[in-house]
Image (spheres, rainbow, N blue to C red):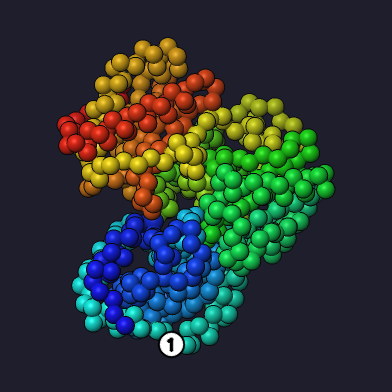
Amino acid sequence: MAVDRLHLMSALEGYILSVSGWRKVFAASGDEQDASPRITEADRVLAVCAGRVIGRFFRERGEGAGVLLARDSRPTGEAICRAIAAGLCMEGVGVRYAGIAAAPEVMAFSAADPEPAGFVYVSASHNPVGHNGIKVGSRGGVLGAREAGELIRRFREEVRGLGETEAAGLLGAEAPPGVWEEEARWKEGALRAYGGFVRRVITGGEAEEVVRRWAELGEGVRRRGAVIVGELNGSARGASVDRDVLEDLGCEVRLFNAAPGGFVHEILPEGESLEMCADLVRGVVEERGCEALGYVPDCDGDRGNLVYGAPGVGVRVPGAQEVFALAVLGELAWLDAVLPGGVRGHRVAVVANGPTSLRVEEVAGAFGAQVVRTEVGEAHVVGKAEELRREGWVVRVMGEGSNGGSIVWPARVRDPLATLGSVLKLLALRDEPYALFRRWCTLRGIPYEPSFTLADVLASLPSYRTTGTGEEAARLTIRSSDQAAFKASYERLFLSDWEGRAQELRRRFGITGFEEHNHEGTVTRVGFGPAFRTGAQKGGLRILFKNEKGEPCAFMWMRKSGTEPLFRVLIDARADIPGLYDYLLEWQHGLIRRADEEAAAGLSPGSTRRCSH
């Protein structure tokens, strides 16, 4: 057997390597919708290389013994895990293989068990079935940007230095049989660790506090009579603790399509992928005459968007941004109830990525909390939250509104069970000392109705119109590969347009000023030009618009995806300003097209300005 260098280098070029994970189409056919379990010989060699590099990395850190290895339910996952395990074993690193497991389960196990040095999780999250990838982390979360970048550098060097003879040896490498014989043992340990950890996450307590608060929440849920519908779409959550945890909390649980790998629709839990869950929720409402809450996870089960139904209300599918805002509301109201002196008695922050809707600023502001923004990517959000905690801030909830994924401390990963917990606390804890929704209504000056439903909670959220990540308008293709040149052109064109549009913007929408925010890693810099960006300038760029009171009312955001070959665009605008969203979307698309033409042609003069108008 032999793999020539041309095929190896071609396979390496197919990788999208970012701090959020390593991803590519692993299906041997190259078709991203191919559900075949077969991967190419070149990709197997590269996966063995990845295992060697990761094993060496953890061995050098000198922390713990062995590495936890698991995967989501994609068909290529087993072949990739076998190759990675071979590479880890070649470096003398023990492998604890837990089979198919949800991402939060893997990370909870890695946080609870001090022995493994870290984890390797094989998944491509929400990408189509033919994709797959690798996430690396330790102690409950993915590696930070610096360590992740170093691992990427080492992986590239390892592959580029590989000769054909050595590659042939790696192609046939295998882990000892004992690795696979111990799967059930490690899977049981992961389930046990996750079941306890998620209760701690939802209650925000320790030891006896967890038991007491869990019982109080469970009593409220039982009085409420909650029905939870999980349409799991063959995801790894079908092999996790969902039923046990939710039933223990007093919910009636109905799970569908729970067999891992049995995909019945697209993996991304947005748009059409939520229609089946909506039908299932509708059936429960008609059968039982009660409220029902549904969720649909992605393949690795680290996020789950919601579906809601109730008599007289019908069925509603909240957008990803609404789901995140709902989680933030639930957790800030919870903090307000359990912190001595409430939220205003502490320095409390919510960490969110650049394209998260301004809804979150309004929710946080009502409680006296601040919103701190980062670049897109779970590692950046979690890293910033940890920085703030070291500085004395309380950061209970963080995440990415653009995908609906909330992370609730002490977790370091998105989790649909935590999101459901945030919602259930709002619905079930109606009496003092909690009374979460009443607290919110008082702060917002909204009339409080004791018999409220989730429809009332959703209606109380600040109203914005926001581009969904699955919409066609959110995904563009640009020719320019030089982000520095592209952004310089974009800025120049924007400033020129602003001069011509300023009067119209004031007259039609009340917009009198703007700021540019550059999100890179955990840092946000305000200002125009390369002086406010670093490196290859690949971070997100956001133009924040303000009214005459200096209040934010909308933004335009863009960024080259780090995990997909796409250029992402998002508009967020207050819904009570007619026409603003459509105006900004058309403007943003035009700016991007024009800037791309200039940058591709090499016509991009630089500019540097401090701030805003």
Amino acid found under the numbered disc labelled 1: Pro
Q: Residue at x 70, y 53 (%)?
A: 229
* In-front residue for pair 601/452: 601
Find numbered disc 1 in the image and state the secondary structure of the residue it sits on: loop
In the depicted structure, whether residue 272 falls above or below residue 547 = below
Q: Position of residue 223 (x, y in %)?
A: 80, 49
Q: Position of residue 554 (x, y in %)?
A: 44, 28
Specify few, some or many for label 1: CA neighbours under 10 Å numbering under 14, 14-19, or 20 or more. Answer: few
Q: Is residue 426 left or right of residue 65?
A: right
Q: Assign the C terminus to one quadrant of the image.
A: top left
In the depicted structure, whether residue 255 falls above or below residue 601 = below
Q: Position of residue 35 (x, y in %)?
A: 51, 64
Q: Is residue 357 left or right of residue 10?
A: right
According to the image, label 1 marks what residue? 176
Q: Residue furthest right?
A: 288
Q: Position of residue 247 (x, y in %)?
A: 73, 60
Q: Residue furthest bottom?
A: 177
Residue 375, by quadrant, is: top left
